[in-house]
Amino acid sequence: MRDGFSAQPGFPELRTYLNTQVFTTLDGFSSPICECYMNIQGTRWYAALALCLAETGRIIATAGAKESPQTTDGVWPVKVNAKSGRLLYCLYFDHNIWAGRFHRETIQHFDAKRSRPYAPATYFASETGDDYLHELMQEHEVWNNRKTIWEKVSQSAVNDYGDCEKIGLVQDWCARMSRNAPDYLLRAGNQAVPR
């Protein structure tokens, strides 16, 4: 984790954060975190899946994919096996679609009139750190096999904050889809199950 935290078995630092953090909106409404979309990719795949199973409906497993499936949404549920043998659904998202939305549409729309429902404008606080902004610039669009893809500017580039922003867009999209078209519903015992 960031900010000097080292990840412990079972992710107690993440659970503590989710249980104690309260956010206040600009209009003064305060609320705890009720749902968390967690990137489960990396060396702790099974530990992340176990946490998602332990906190079903609260911590949603997500993972970026380089391949583009036959979907126009750019988000699709995939059954994955945890070490315990239990199944859960992970929301895979098309990295190229969501990186493009973030870099081309969201991050560049500082005018509220240009904000789009599927890619709301991103505003940064004046005290946003340089490391955050630096990581947002660690991907670029390149031509590959007659199409454009988004990739890191170098093998050593760190883009964790950029990934968080993309997952935030996916989270927003899923929330709007669950209200508007009930294709993605969070059910007890499962995650993001298509009807």
Image (tube, rainbow, N blue to C red):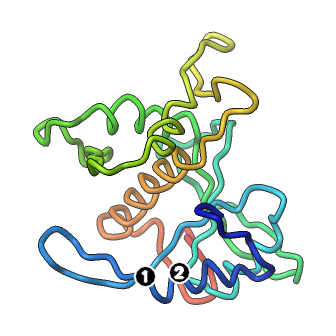
Decide: few, some or many residues near mark 2? Use Cα within 10 Å; few <14, some 14-19, many ≥20: few
In this picture, residue 81 sits left or right of residue 66: right
Tell me how many marks there are. Answer: 2
Q: Where's the N terminus, which quadrant?
A: bottom right
102 and 139: which one is in front? 139
Residue drawn at the location 88% of the way across and 80% of the way down: 85
Q: Could you tell me which residue is drawn at 62 percent across and 81 percent down?
A: 190
Q: Are marks 2 and 1 in contact (CB under 8 Å)?
A: yes
Residue 183, disc = none
Where is mark 1, residue-wise?
Answer: 21
Q: Residue at x 70, y 25 (%)?
A: 154
Amino acid of disc 1: Gln
Q: Is 155 situated above or below 74?
A: above
Disc 2 from disc 1: Cα separation: 6 Å
Residue position for label 2: 17
Q: Which residue is drawn at 46% across and 50% down?
A: 165
96 relative to 52, above or below: above
Residue closer to the observer: 171 or 42: 42
Amino acid residing under circle 2: Tyr
Q: Whole-percent x and y of residue 126?
A: 26, 48
**Crowd tier of the residue under label 1, counting other residues whose Cα lies within 10 Å: few below 14, some 14–19, many 20 or above:** few
Q: What element carries label 1?
A: loop
Quadrant in the rendering for residue 144: top right
Q: In this view, does 191 lie above or below 189?
A: above
Residue 46 quadrant: bottom right
Q: Where is residue 135 in the image (x, y as percent from the top left)?
A: 54, 39
Residue 186 rendering spot, x and y as whole percentages: 50, 78
Q: Is mark 2 on a helix, strand or loop?
A: helix
